[in-house]
Structure formats: structure tokens, C-alpha cells
Image (cartoon, rainbow, N blue to C red):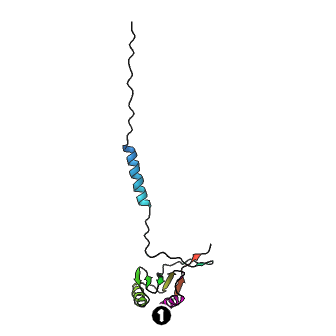
Amino acid sequence: MAVKFTRRLKTKVVLDMAPMIDIVFQLIIFFMLATQVKITTGMEFELPKAENLSKIAETPLKITIISKNSILVGTKKTNSANFSRVLSESSAASSGDRKSVILYGNKNIEYELLIQVMDTLKEHGYDSIDLALNRKS
């Protein structure tokens, strides 16, 4: 008399991918909403360094001096010859009693160019002219 053993069928393991795909899409949406993209325009240059720096509370006009042929007034590119005209256009668009400006410039710009720009700013009524610097390490 032979004993017959019945074979048990092995259960198949099924991995459901739908919940994992849902979580991945939720993470993608979260990071898309939480990430801030900051696009910077302009050229890369090295600011001079100083030990004593102060923070500026208001948002003044930003002027970047790269060379005699390349001065940025806000986002408008000009040269030293047309700087006064472009400055007049941008100061007419700005409102407020106190006109202030921050000057950015490579540490290798000509001192004469910096003085010319500052003199033009004073002629246009800018009473607060600040220089952008990096803190000394």
C-alpha cells in the first residue's frame, strides 16, 4: 500500500508597484513645490573684503561695475558714456524720498571709474551710496 502525498502549491509572491509609484510621484510634487529656483544674471567677479560690515534694511538700486564698457544698472547693461542716461531712466521709474544705491564691482576695477560712477550718482540725487563687500576670513 503506497501512501500518496499531495503536493502543496507554492504561493507566488506578487509585488504591487502601484503604491510605490504613488509615493514617488508625491515626493516629486513635494520637492517641486518646496524648491526655490534662483536664476542669477551677470558675471562672476570677486568682491573686495573688509572686516566691519553692516546690513542694509531697504532694497536700493543695484549697480555692477565690470569695466568702462560694461556697467549694469539693475538689469540694464550700459557703458560709462551712457551711464547717466540709463540712470536717469531707472531713477524716474523708482519712487521714494530717499534714493539709495549699492555698488558692486570687481576688486580690480579702476579707481577713477568708481569715482566717476559715484559722482554721477550724486548728481542724480542719490544720497546713500553703499559698496558691496565680502567679510574677511
Please state the horizontal and vertical placement of residue 97, each as a whole percent of the image: 47, 87
Q: Quadrant of residue 130?
A: bottom right
Looking at this view, name the residue that lies furthest to the bottom. 123
Looking at this view, name the residue that lies furthest to the top. 1
| Residue 59 lies in the magenta stretch | no
| Direction from residue 117 to residue 136 in the image, left or right | right
Which one is in front, 98 or 122? Answer: 122
| Residue 112 lies in the magenta stretch | yes
Please state the horizontal and vertical placement of residue 64, each as a whole percent of the image: 47, 81
> Quarter of the image containing the N terminus?
top left
Is residue 120 positioned above or below 14 on the image? below
Residue drawn 44% across the image and 61% down it: 35
Which one is in front, 59 or 51? Answer: 51
Is residue 17 positioned above or below 120 on the image? above
Q: Quadrant of residue 51?
A: bottom right
Residue type at numbered disc 1: Glu
Please state the horizontal and vertical placement of residue 132, each as a whole percent of the image: 54, 79
* Secondary element type, mark 1: helix
> The magenta stretch spans which residues?
106-123
Q: Which residue is mark 1?
A: 123
Please state the horizontal and vertical placement of residue 45, each as a whole percent of the image: 50, 76
Which one is in front, 96 or 29? Answer: 29
Alpha-carbon neighbours of circle 1 within 10 Å: few (<14), some, or many (≥20)? few
Residue drawn 41% across the image and 48% down it: 23
Q: Main secondary structure of the magenta part?
A: helix
Counting labels gives: 1
